[in-house]
Image: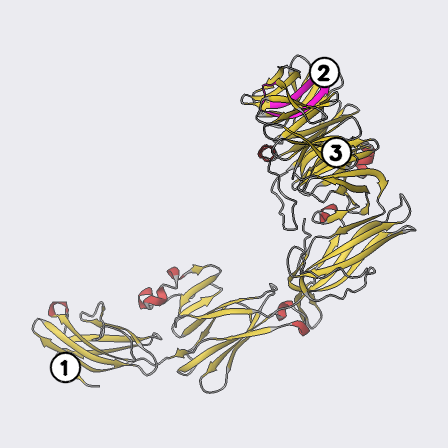
Amino acid sequence: MESLMHSLHRALLSAVLVFPAMAQQPSAVFDSFNDWLGAEARGVRIEADGSLKLAPNLRRVAQLPEGVVWCVVPDGAGGAFISAGNEGKLFRFSGNQVKPLAQVKGGIVFAMARLGQDLIVAPSGENKLFRVTPSGEVKSFAEIDARLVWAMTAQGSDLYLAGGNEKGAVFLLAREGSSRKLAEQADETAFTSLLSDTQGGWYLGSHGHGLVMRYSGEHLETLAATGFEQVQTLAMQNGVIYIGADNGLAKRFTAGNLEKRESYLSSRSSGAKGAVIALDRNRVPATLWQSDQSQVFSMTLWNNQLLVGTGNRARIFSIPIDPKVRDLVPFAVLQDLGTAQATAFMSMGSDLLAVGSNPAELHVLSEAQATEGTIESQVLKGMPLADWGRAYVEADTPQSTNVDLQYRVGSTEAPDGTWSPWTPPLRSGERPNLQPTRFAQFRLKLTSSRGGTTPVVNVVRVHWANRNLAPQWESIDTMPPGLVITRSAPTDDIGIERIPLQTQKLIPALGYLGSEKRSFRRGAQAFAFKVSDPNGDQLNFRISLIPDKGNPILLESMWRERFFTFDSLPVPDGRYRLEVTATDAPSQPFNLALTSTWRTAAFTIDHTPPVISELTAIPEGDSIHIKFVARDEMSVLEEAAVSADGDGWLQIAPEDRVFDSKEERFDVLIPKDRVKGDRIIVKVMDANNNEQTAAITIGEIKKH
């Protein structure tokens, strides 16, 4: 789990000064179990309280060419039979070497059992059992009514099988040449785990509703419903049944497709993936361990603890069997195989064979404590670049033990060859000599030269400062004249019919748009800022009006909104630019604050209305022939209209049909039946919404 980093803001008030809120420098504290979820541990035990110790010694003894190991059983001679891969391949492990044994017809072999010196296997999809001799000879053993066998146990010459067919879950008894059904459960897909109750009966775990059932020789009895999809594995000690339950695992097993080891980029799921549940003698369930990241692949009892092999980080969890011990230490990560899944366990005297998959590896876990171990933290991330500071390690280091701290940095989210090498060991609180980068990681090395004695790391605190970057401008949008953008409610509008059409489109119902209010007021000039800060800092803006000639006019020095409107009526006509300087000073120390500036393209401030001249209105047949010229000193003309009845306006176009000039000529015929009275009124408007009207008596000629 990635550690949580909060940006806190504090306002410090003195008698005469109010200091702006500063973003607190980030840090990471590793003092709980979840803080180490994304870490890579080798030889380090992670306790439930987040403390770190040296783990039991783990050594890799062999590798297999196949990616996944499905099943391991003792060969009776100190070694093991192994099924691996998706093509029924079998291997034998002996003398720390793995050699091919045989290949059986069919698919994956999930279940095997040793019968005498031979191996009995159940490849998926075959409805058969095969006998494999120590020399690798494969013979048919029995026909079975199960397409897929998940678990198998031998008792004398009898084989007990847990599996499934087209009709549901089946529990079978097989002998050489024959088999018969002992029990079935049509509501479940398959029985996926099998365990003797030591009294002639059997415990069965199912896939479908995740049931734990007991077969007593006559019928099936449901002991528990786990709430999970599948019971993957069962174990028992002192009458307590331990259940390894999962969601979403069976389909991946059946397809033979287990994922690779999760990386630093893996994400948390929204629900529980796996759990370990204890069913006491009174069949009262209690959840001992649950995870929304890890699934249970295997489980075994070892040295008064329950070991749980998980994926997809192949961590082996340890859960104490003694309830009193479990109250103090509910669980721990005992070891990490470094593969994707810990798919099987097998006892080897006092040691334990731990099997990893993706890649397929065999490891031996011993009771003796490792003499050294390392743990690499999750990757720490700057926003977007960081100066990496000191780390403080709180640890108990008995005599002959030690804890070293090292750093490395890089520019990729997952460490690769482009990252720096690890620094020399640093003392707690010693400043590392590192370049500013986006990512960093620390490593702890625990050592002990005296057997059974371990250092204990309780807390690691890491500090850094995000490198401040200047605000980044994308643009400033200049709005049409008259548009008002405010945070408060708009003022009373002046009537939608008097607002230019292109401005109306930007004022949805003259009302609310997002977090701002839009309205219309003559002489207003509005702007919308498109600017961001790489550090997520709060921004202030210094805003100035820059004329083509003359000195800048300061409009605002501490503006906070991403929009701005000013009244241009007091400003002389002319060409201007808006210059806005963004600063992250509200969120940064004074000596680290940065600025960036954007200047708009030139825009026109024009308060002078157009001039109408050469206006005539002459009767011509059944029409009135109207002519006039309109001219503006600053802006292109945009609208013209004629009122022939004194009530409404008729929009008209210029002679050349296009409003594209500061001067336009108009020539239009109005039917006499549209005219009321003896006067004609014309009006024109420029691009800055300045309006001019003129009236004429029909038959009159006005040249000016």
The magenta stretch is 143-163
Determine the secondary structure under disc 1. loop
Residue 149 lies, in percent from the top left, at: 62, 25
Q: Which of marks 1 and 2 is nearer the N terminus?
A: 2
Q: How far apart are marks 2 and 3 (CA)?
A: 24 Å
Mark 2 — residue? 157
Examine the image and state in which quarter residue 128 appears: top right
Q: Nearer the viewer, residue 182 or 586?
A: 182
> How many numbered markers are drawn?
3
Residue 285 lies in what quarter of the image? Answer: top right
Q: Can residue 64 be seen in this view?
A: yes
Is 100 drawn above or below residue 475 in the view shown? above
Q: Name the residue under label 1.
A: 700
Q: Give the foreground label among 1 and 3.
A: 3
- Indicate which disc residue 93 carries: 3
Q: Which amino acid does label 2 sit on?
A: Ser
Which residue is the extreme one toward the left?
621
